[in-house]
Amino acid sequence: MKQPQNARHEKRRSGKKKRDAEEIQQELEWDCENYCDAEIDRYIEQNSGAFEALKDAKWKEDRERFQLGDRKHGENVGPA
């Protein structure tokens, strides 16, 4: 059974509306991600000393934690 012309047209139109809405949503998500990335970069640039200190402290903490963890299990990771 064939759909009436108006029903087919309406189905196509609603499908296009849905695709358009999905595209707009994706663009908003990309814009949000770009904004967040730019703000992070700006913050790091304006606070580079604090950022480097935090990064170094985290690196040291991770290094100590993983070296201690490996020694507890009797594994040799390399020169200590």
Image: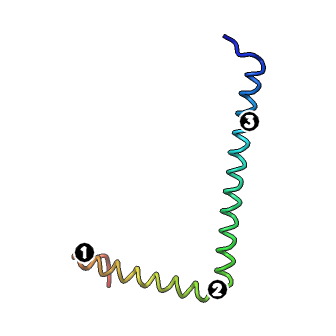
- Residue visible at 58% across and 88% down? 50
Nearer to us of marks 1 and 2 is 2
**Identity, as a three-letter code, of the amino acid under mark 2:** Asn
Quarter-wise, where is residue 53 in the image? bottom right
- Placement of the N terminus among the 4 image quadrants: top right
**Depth check, front residue: 12 or 67:** 12
- Residue visible at 73% across and 29% down? 12
**Identity, as a three-letter code, of the amino acid under mark 3:** Lys
Quarter-wise, where is residue 49 in the image? bottom right
Quickly name the residue at label 1.
Answer: 75
- Residue 46 as seen in the image, left or right of residue 58: right
Q: Give me the C-alpha separation between circle 3 and circle 2.
A: 46 Å
Quickly name the residue at label 2.
Answer: 47
- Residue visible at 40% across and 79% down? 62
Quarter-wise, where is residue 38 in the image? bottom right
Nearer to us of marks 3 and 2 is 3
Q: Secondary structure at mark 3?
A: helix
